[in-house]
Amino acid sequence: MITRLALSLSLSFLLNWGMAHLVLAEVAGNLIIAGNGPELTTIEPLARAFEKANPRAYLDVVWDSNSRPVEMVKSGQAHIAITGTAAQDLSATPIAWDGIGILMHLSNLTKELTKQQAADIFSGKITMWSELGGLDTEILVIDRPRNQNVREAFESQLGITGKITSNAKIIGSDEQVIKTVVGTLPPLSAIAYLSLSQSLSVVANGVAVKLVPIDKIEPEGPTVKDGRYPLRRQILLASKKEPHPLAEAFIQFARSQAGQQLIADTYIPLNEK
């Protein structure tokens, strides 16, 4: 005869066993994550940590500076896209904050910019450094490819969407952007923008570049966290709205304490904004 206690324990065991196997089933399989920007240094460790915690899950991180990750998700070529703005027909989940740094040569005489001056430079209204207290040198504007997340956020933050000067030099690689700012002739003429996490690292390593304050606010982690620095973007994970167990599990992991600790190595975690 089965006692109530024994029956209760048996049901509890079966329920827990079933739930455990259900969770395992949900995080098993293959997942493709697509991106094209500086977030690779964060997404790759996140993917490997997720695989370690879920041995039956296999994550493929597909990264190409010329790719269109959001379109890859829409067409079924990827399950998750790393993006900076919400996309129509997709769910977008924030996992971190990043600033956008404006970079120029270390010896450039211009010490700071207002947000309006930055907009005027990149839209082509201000063309000479002498208009900003610098040398009588033409400004070389460096832009980023249209498909990159940082460009879309930068345009939006400055209110110049679709208005970046056609005279700008478009460079995809962060490394090449930095080399161009350092080595452009005539000297000190180039100005560019890139992820704050990348640019702070470059400055710390002694490269002859500087990040300029915007509206007298220094571009640094604390000012991005509290929103005082005006150029910042969210890092989003975009996926189809139809439930996909493995994609949902990875998104939850990225927002978990363990995931946010990994993200903090390069970006500003959500719980610290």
Image: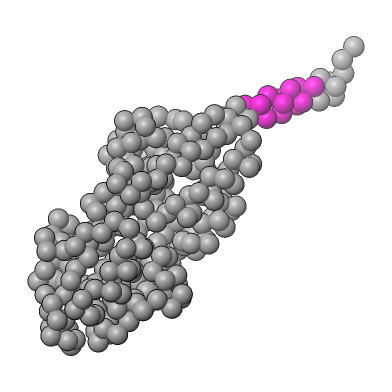
* Display colour scheme: one colour
Up-down relation of residue 134 to residue 146 (above or below): below
Can you say whether 169 is above or below 50 in the image? below
* Residue in front for this viewpoint, 193 or 106: 106
Q: Position of residue 8 (x, y in %)?
A: 79, 24
> For this view, does 39 lie left or right of residue 59?
left
Q: Main secondary structure of the magenta part?
A: helix
Residue closer to the observer: 139 or 196: 139
> Magenta residues, as a range?
10-23
Q: Residue at x 16, y 63 (%)?
A: 168
The location of residue 121, given as percent across then percent down, is: 16, 72
Left or right of 164 in this view: 175: right
Residue 126 image position (x, y, % from top left): 11, 75
Q: State the residue at coordinates (42%, 54%).
A: 39
The answer, for residue 105, to whether it is visible in the render is yes
Residue 224, located in which quarter of the rendered image?
Answer: bottom left
Nearest the viewer among 187 and 43 is: 187
